[in-house]
Image (tube, rainbow, N blue to C red):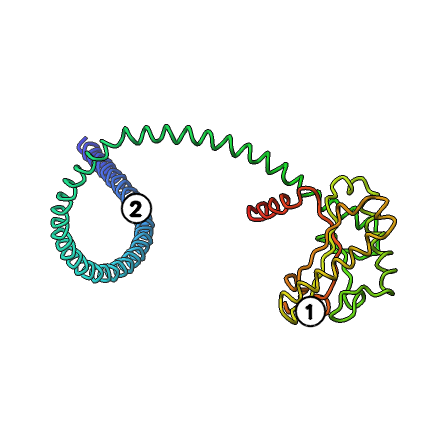
Amino acid sequence: MNFFKQDNENTNFWVSYADLMAGLLFVFILLIGAIVTKSIILKSDLLSNKTRLQKNKTVLELKNDEIKRLKKILLEKNTQLVSFSKKIIILQSITNDVNASLLEKERKLKDYEGKILVLSNELTDVNNSVKLRDEEIVKLLDTIGEKETRYDRLVEQMQKTKKSIKNLTGIRIKVIAELKKALGKKIKINPKTGSMRFSSSILFDVGKAKLKEDAKLELKKVFLQYVKALLSNPDIKKHLNNIIIEGHTDSDGGFLYNLQLSQKRAYEVMNYLLTLNFVKKHHLKGIMIASGRSYLNPVLDKNGKEDKKKSRRIEIKFTLKNNDAMKEIEKILDEKK
Protein backbone atom coordinates (compact mmCIF):
# COMPACT_ATOMS: atom_id res chain seq x y z
CA MET A 1 0.00 0.00 0.00
CA ASN A 2 2.79 2.32 0.91
CA PHE A 3 4.55 1.32 -2.28
CA PHE A 4 1.63 2.24 -4.40
CA LYS A 5 1.12 5.41 -2.43
CA GLN A 6 4.76 6.36 -2.85
CA ASP A 7 4.59 5.51 -6.51
CA ASN A 8 1.56 7.73 -6.93
CA GLU A 9 3.26 10.54 -5.18
CA ASN A 10 6.26 10.24 -7.48
CA THR A 11 3.99 10.14 -10.40
CA ASN A 12 2.18 13.26 -9.28
CA PHE A 13 5.54 15.00 -8.74
CA TRP A 14 6.69 14.38 -12.22
CA VAL A 15 3.34 15.29 -13.57
CA SER A 16 3.47 18.53 -11.68
CA TYR A 17 7.07 18.98 -12.77
CA ALA A 18 6.11 18.30 -16.34
CA ASP A 19 3.27 20.77 -16.11
CA LEU A 20 5.61 23.27 -14.58
CA MET A 21 8.16 22.79 -17.32
CA ALA A 22 5.44 22.95 -19.93
CA GLY A 23 4.23 26.20 -18.39
CA LEU A 24 7.75 27.54 -18.33
CA LEU A 25 8.26 26.49 -21.92
CA PHE A 26 5.04 28.22 -22.93
CA VAL A 27 6.09 31.32 -21.04
CA PHE A 28 9.52 31.15 -22.76
CA ILE A 29 7.87 30.72 -26.13
CA LEU A 30 5.58 33.67 -25.40
CA LEU A 31 8.60 35.65 -24.28
CA ILE A 32 10.54 34.74 -27.45
CA GLY A 33 7.47 35.64 -29.58
CA ALA A 34 7.12 38.91 -27.76
CA ILE A 35 10.83 39.64 -28.27
CA VAL A 36 10.62 38.74 -31.99
CA THR A 37 7.46 40.82 -32.40
CA LYS A 38 9.04 43.71 -30.58
CA SER A 39 12.12 43.38 -32.72
CA ILE A 40 10.04 43.43 -35.87
CA ILE A 41 8.11 46.46 -34.62
CA LEU A 42 11.35 48.20 -33.62
CA LYS A 43 12.91 47.40 -36.99
CA SER A 44 9.83 48.74 -38.76
CA ASP A 45 9.89 51.87 -36.61
CA LEU A 46 13.60 52.20 -37.21
CA LEU A 47 13.06 51.95 -40.98
CA SER A 48 10.22 54.43 -40.76
CA ASN A 49 12.36 56.76 -38.65
CA LYS A 50 15.23 56.36 -41.08
CA THR A 51 12.96 57.24 -44.01
CA ARG A 52 11.55 60.19 -42.11
CA LEU A 53 15.06 61.22 -41.13
CA GLN A 54 16.13 61.08 -44.79
CA LYS A 55 13.16 63.23 -45.75
CA ASN A 56 13.98 65.64 -42.94
CA LYS A 57 17.58 65.69 -44.15
CA THR A 58 16.41 66.50 -47.69
CA VAL A 59 14.11 69.21 -46.36
CA LEU A 60 16.93 70.50 -44.20
CA GLU A 61 19.25 70.65 -47.23
CA LEU A 62 16.57 72.53 -49.19
CA LYS A 63 16.14 74.91 -46.29
CA ASN A 64 19.91 75.35 -46.12
CA ASP A 65 19.90 76.26 -49.85
CA GLU A 66 16.99 78.62 -49.25
CA ILE A 67 18.84 80.13 -46.31
CA LYS A 68 21.92 80.62 -48.52
CA ARG A 69 19.76 82.25 -51.20
CA LEU A 70 18.08 84.44 -48.61
CA LYS A 71 21.50 85.36 -47.19
CA LYS A 72 22.62 86.35 -50.71
CA ILE A 73 19.46 88.41 -51.20
CA LEU A 74 19.95 89.93 -47.75
CA LEU A 75 23.52 90.83 -48.70
CA GLU A 76 22.31 92.49 -51.90
CA LYS A 77 19.60 94.30 -49.97
CA ASN A 78 22.19 95.46 -47.46
CA THR A 79 24.34 96.75 -50.33
CA GLN A 80 21.30 98.54 -51.79
CA LEU A 81 20.46 99.84 -48.33
CA VAL A 82 23.95 101.31 -48.03
CA SER A 83 23.54 102.91 -51.45
CA PHE A 84 20.11 104.22 -50.49
CA SER A 85 21.54 105.55 -47.26
CA LYS A 86 24.15 107.51 -49.21
CA LYS A 87 21.45 108.82 -51.53
CA ILE A 88 19.30 109.75 -48.54
CA ILE A 89 22.22 111.70 -47.10
CA ILE A 90 22.59 113.52 -50.43
CA LEU A 91 18.83 114.13 -50.59
CA GLN A 92 18.87 115.43 -47.04
CA SER A 93 21.60 117.85 -48.05
CA ILE A 94 19.57 118.93 -51.09
CA THR A 95 16.46 119.17 -48.91
CA ASN A 96 18.30 121.41 -46.50
CA ASP A 97 19.37 123.65 -49.39
CA VAL A 98 15.81 123.66 -50.74
CA ASN A 99 14.42 124.48 -47.33
CA ALA A 100 16.85 127.36 -47.04
CA SER A 101 15.82 128.54 -50.50
CA LEU A 102 12.15 128.19 -49.58
CA LEU A 103 12.69 130.24 -46.46
CA GLU A 104 14.31 132.95 -48.56
CA LYS A 105 11.46 132.81 -51.06
CA GLU A 106 8.93 132.87 -48.26
CA ARG A 107 10.57 136.05 -46.99
CA LYS A 108 10.42 137.55 -50.48
CA LEU A 109 6.82 136.35 -50.80
CA LYS A 110 5.89 138.29 -47.71
CA ASP A 111 7.46 141.36 -49.24
CA TYR A 112 5.48 140.72 -52.45
CA GLU A 113 2.30 140.26 -50.42
CA GLY A 114 2.80 143.74 -49.04
CA LYS A 115 3.27 145.12 -52.54
CA ILE A 116 0.29 143.10 -53.81
CA LEU A 117 -1.84 144.57 -51.09
CA VAL A 118 -0.90 148.04 -52.30
CA LEU A 119 -1.57 147.03 -55.89
CA SER A 120 -4.86 145.43 -54.85
CA ASN A 121 -5.99 148.71 -53.38
CA GLU A 122 -4.99 150.47 -56.57
CA LEU A 123 -6.77 147.79 -58.60
CA THR A 124 -9.90 148.30 -56.56
CA ASP A 125 -9.82 151.96 -57.49
CA VAL A 126 -9.33 150.99 -61.15
CA ASN A 127 -12.22 148.50 -60.98
CA ASN A 128 -14.44 151.18 -59.60
CA SER A 129 -13.43 153.39 -62.49
CA VAL A 130 -13.99 150.54 -64.98
CA LYS A 131 -17.46 149.86 -63.62
CA LEU A 132 -18.36 153.45 -64.35
CA ARG A 133 -17.45 152.84 -68.01
CA ASP A 134 -19.22 149.48 -68.37
CA GLU A 135 -22.46 151.09 -69.46
CA GLU A 136 -20.62 153.16 -72.04
CA ILE A 137 -18.90 150.02 -73.35
CA VAL A 138 -22.23 148.19 -73.62
CA LYS A 139 -23.60 151.07 -75.65
CA LEU A 140 -20.52 151.04 -77.85
CA LEU A 141 -20.85 147.28 -78.37
CA ASP A 142 -24.44 147.73 -79.46
CA THR A 143 -23.29 150.38 -81.91
CA ILE A 144 -20.47 148.13 -83.16
CA GLY A 145 -22.94 145.27 -83.60
CA GLU A 146 -25.10 147.46 -85.79
CA LYS A 147 -22.06 148.55 -87.80
CA GLU A 148 -20.88 144.93 -88.19
CA THR A 149 -24.27 144.02 -89.59
CA ARG A 150 -24.00 146.83 -92.11
CA TYR A 151 -20.40 145.78 -92.82
CA ASP A 152 -21.48 142.18 -93.50
CA ARG A 153 -24.05 143.46 -95.97
CA LEU A 154 -21.39 145.61 -97.64
CA VAL A 155 -19.00 142.63 -97.84
CA GLU A 156 -21.71 140.54 -99.45
CA GLN A 157 -22.39 143.30 -101.98
CA MET A 158 -18.64 143.69 -102.58
CA GLN A 159 -18.29 139.97 -103.31
CA LYS A 160 -21.02 140.20 -105.90
CA THR A 161 -19.40 143.32 -107.37
CA LYS A 162 -16.00 141.62 -107.41
CA LYS A 163 -17.47 138.70 -109.33
CA SER A 164 -18.94 141.11 -111.88
CA ILE A 165 -15.59 142.95 -112.12
CA LYS A 166 -13.73 139.72 -112.82
CA ASN A 167 -16.13 139.00 -115.63
CA LEU A 168 -15.46 142.51 -117.00
CA THR A 169 -11.67 142.15 -116.84
CA GLY A 170 -11.91 138.87 -118.69
CA ILE A 171 -13.13 140.74 -121.80
CA ARG A 172 -9.59 141.88 -122.78
CA ILE A 173 -8.26 138.33 -122.47
CA LYS A 174 -11.13 137.09 -124.59
CA VAL A 175 -10.58 139.79 -127.24
CA ILE A 176 -6.82 139.07 -127.48
CA ALA A 177 -7.55 135.35 -127.78
CA GLU A 178 -10.04 135.98 -130.59
CA LEU A 179 -7.55 138.32 -132.32
CA LYS A 180 -4.75 135.73 -132.17
CA LYS A 181 -7.13 133.11 -133.51
CA ALA A 182 -8.09 135.34 -136.45
CA LEU A 183 -4.51 136.37 -137.33
CA GLY A 184 -2.97 132.96 -136.73
CA LYS A 185 0.79 132.92 -137.39
CA LYS A 186 0.66 135.57 -140.12
CA ILE A 187 1.04 138.49 -137.74
CA LYS A 188 2.80 138.37 -134.39
CA ILE A 189 1.05 140.31 -131.63
CA ASN A 190 1.83 140.95 -127.96
CA PRO A 191 0.02 138.19 -126.01
CA LYS A 192 -0.71 140.56 -123.09
CA THR A 193 -1.82 143.74 -124.87
CA GLY A 194 -2.77 142.49 -128.35
CA SER A 195 -0.57 145.18 -129.96
CA MET A 196 1.68 144.70 -133.03
CA ARG A 197 5.08 146.31 -133.49
CA PHE A 198 7.05 147.81 -136.46
CA SER A 199 10.74 148.67 -136.21
CA SER A 200 11.42 152.37 -136.87
CA SER A 201 14.44 151.41 -138.97
CA ILE A 202 12.09 149.73 -141.46
CA LEU A 203 9.60 152.64 -141.64
CA PHE A 204 11.89 155.67 -141.30
CA ASP A 205 15.39 156.89 -141.93
CA VAL A 206 17.51 157.75 -138.85
CA GLY A 207 16.23 160.92 -137.17
CA LYS A 208 13.53 161.42 -139.83
CA ALA A 209 9.73 161.34 -139.64
CA LYS A 210 9.08 160.75 -143.36
CA LEU A 211 7.59 157.30 -144.09
CA LYS A 212 9.67 155.28 -146.54
CA GLU A 213 7.87 154.50 -149.80
CA ASP A 214 9.02 150.88 -149.86
CA ALA A 215 7.66 150.39 -146.31
CA LYS A 216 4.12 151.57 -147.09
CA LEU A 217 3.04 148.39 -148.89
CA GLU A 218 4.02 146.10 -145.98
CA LEU A 219 2.50 148.54 -143.46
CA LYS A 220 -0.77 148.60 -145.42
CA LYS A 221 -0.89 144.80 -145.70
CA VAL A 222 -0.27 144.12 -142.04
CA PHE A 223 -2.51 146.94 -140.78
CA LEU A 224 -5.48 145.86 -142.91
CA GLN A 225 -5.21 142.27 -141.69
CA TYR A 226 -5.04 143.51 -138.10
CA VAL A 227 -8.00 145.93 -138.42
CA LYS A 228 -10.11 143.46 -140.40
CA ALA A 229 -9.60 140.89 -137.62
CA LEU A 230 -10.81 143.49 -135.09
CA LEU A 231 -13.87 144.58 -137.05
CA SER A 232 -14.98 141.32 -138.65
CA ASN A 233 -15.35 139.52 -135.34
CA PRO A 234 -18.52 140.69 -133.54
CA ASP A 235 -17.11 139.49 -130.20
CA ILE A 236 -14.24 142.00 -130.65
CA LYS A 237 -15.99 144.82 -132.50
CA LYS A 238 -18.66 145.36 -129.83
CA HIS A 239 -15.95 146.11 -127.24
CA LEU A 240 -13.60 148.12 -129.53
CA ASN A 241 -13.08 151.74 -128.48
CA ASN A 242 -9.96 153.18 -130.22
CA ILE A 243 -7.11 152.19 -132.53
CA ILE A 244 -3.90 153.84 -131.34
CA ILE A 245 -0.66 154.43 -133.27
CA GLU A 246 2.18 154.98 -130.78
CA GLY A 247 5.68 156.28 -131.62
CA HIS A 248 8.61 155.22 -129.39
CA THR A 249 12.31 156.15 -129.38
CA ASP A 250 15.41 155.03 -127.50
CA SER A 251 16.97 157.12 -124.72
CA ASP A 252 19.61 158.80 -126.89
CA GLY A 253 19.05 162.57 -126.95
CA GLY A 254 16.75 164.75 -124.88
CA PHE A 255 13.24 163.87 -123.84
CA LEU A 256 11.53 166.74 -125.72
CA TYR A 257 13.44 166.04 -128.93
CA ASN A 258 12.45 162.35 -128.78
CA LEU A 259 8.88 163.27 -127.85
CA GLN A 260 8.57 165.49 -130.91
CA LEU A 261 10.17 162.84 -133.18
CA SER A 262 7.97 160.03 -131.85
CA GLN A 263 4.86 162.20 -132.18
CA LYS A 264 5.68 163.15 -135.81
CA ARG A 265 6.29 159.50 -136.73
CA ALA A 266 3.00 158.41 -135.14
CA TYR A 267 1.12 161.15 -137.08
CA GLU A 268 2.92 160.17 -140.30
CA VAL A 269 1.78 156.55 -139.98
CA MET A 270 -1.79 157.52 -139.04
CA ASN A 271 -2.07 160.02 -141.94
CA TYR A 272 -0.98 157.30 -144.36
CA LEU A 273 -3.43 154.76 -142.94
CA LEU A 274 -6.28 157.28 -143.17
CA THR A 275 -5.79 157.34 -146.97
CA LEU A 276 -6.66 153.66 -147.28
CA ASN A 277 -10.07 152.88 -148.80
CA PHE A 278 -10.86 150.30 -146.12
CA VAL A 279 -10.33 152.88 -143.38
CA LYS A 280 -12.54 155.41 -145.19
CA LYS A 281 -15.24 152.83 -145.90
CA HIS A 282 -15.52 151.82 -142.24
CA HIS A 283 -15.22 155.39 -140.92
CA LEU A 284 -12.21 154.57 -138.72
CA LYS A 285 -10.97 158.17 -138.64
CA GLY A 286 -13.03 158.90 -135.55
CA ILE A 287 -11.47 156.10 -133.51
CA MET A 288 -7.83 156.42 -134.64
CA ILE A 289 -5.39 158.24 -132.34
CA ALA A 290 -1.69 159.07 -132.80
CA SER A 291 0.53 159.42 -129.74
CA GLY A 292 4.27 160.03 -129.21
CA ARG A 293 5.80 158.42 -126.12
CA SER A 294 9.45 159.53 -126.44
CA TYR A 295 11.56 156.98 -124.45
CA LEU A 296 9.01 156.48 -121.63
CA ASN A 297 8.39 152.81 -122.55
CA PRO A 298 11.73 151.26 -123.52
CA VAL A 299 12.11 147.58 -124.47
CA LEU A 300 14.37 145.79 -122.01
CA ASP A 301 16.61 142.78 -122.62
CA LYS A 302 16.81 139.72 -120.36
CA ASN A 303 19.25 141.55 -118.07
CA GLY A 304 16.87 144.49 -117.59
CA LYS A 305 18.86 146.89 -119.76
CA GLU A 306 17.41 148.98 -122.60
CA ASP A 307 17.46 147.33 -126.03
CA LYS A 308 17.79 150.53 -128.08
CA LYS A 309 17.13 148.90 -131.45
CA LYS A 310 13.86 147.34 -130.29
CA SER A 311 12.90 150.50 -128.37
CA ARG A 312 12.82 152.50 -131.64
CA ARG A 313 9.42 151.34 -132.88
CA ILE A 314 5.86 152.06 -133.94
CA GLU A 315 3.14 150.16 -132.09
CA ILE A 316 -0.43 149.78 -133.30
CA LYS A 317 -2.80 148.76 -130.54
CA PHE A 318 -6.44 148.97 -129.56
CA THR A 319 -8.35 150.02 -126.46
CA LEU A 320 -11.65 148.66 -125.26
CA LYS A 321 -14.65 150.51 -123.97
CA ASN A 322 -14.20 151.46 -120.31
CA ASN A 323 -10.54 150.55 -120.78
CA ASP A 324 -9.23 152.91 -118.07
CA ALA A 325 -11.79 151.62 -115.59
CA MET A 326 -10.82 148.05 -116.36
CA LYS A 327 -7.14 148.84 -115.82
CA GLU A 328 -7.86 150.31 -112.40
CA ILE A 329 -10.05 147.35 -111.53
CA GLU A 330 -7.34 144.91 -112.59
CA LYS A 331 -4.83 146.71 -110.34
CA ILE A 332 -7.22 146.50 -107.40
CA LEU A 333 -7.87 142.81 -108.00
CA ASP A 334 -4.14 142.11 -108.25
CA GLU A 335 -3.54 143.90 -104.93
CA LYS A 336 -6.28 141.87 -103.22
CA LYS A 337 -4.81 138.49 -104.27
Residue carrying label 1: 307
Image position of 10 with respect to 204: above or below? above
Q: Whole-Å distance between the Cαs marked 1 and 2?
A: 131 Å
Q: Residue at x 17, y 33 (%)?
A: 2
Image position of 178 with respect to 130: above or below? below
- Label 2: few (<14), some (14–19) or many (≥20) C-alpha neighbours in 10 Å: few
In the shown orientation, is residue 256 left or right of residue 135?
A: right
Residue carrying label 2: 45
Image position of 233 with respect to 273: above or below? above
Image quarter for residue 313?
Answer: bottom right
Front residue of 47 and 307: 307
Question: Residue 211: percent from the left, percent from the top?
Answer: 81, 63
In the shown orientation, is residue 273 left or right of residue 119?
A: right
**In front of the other: label 1 or label 2?**
1
Image quarter for residue 33?
Answer: top left
Question: Residue 237: percent from the left, percent from the top?
Answer: 78, 42
- Label 1: few (<14), some (14–19) or many (≥20) C-alpha neighbours in 10 Å: some
SS assignment at label 2: helix
Front residue of 267 and 112: 267
Amino acid type, residue under disc 1 in the picture: Asp
Question: Residue 325: percent from the left, percent from the top?
Answer: 62, 43
Front residue of 226 and 98: 226
Q: Could you say which disc has been placed on residue 4 in the image?
A: none
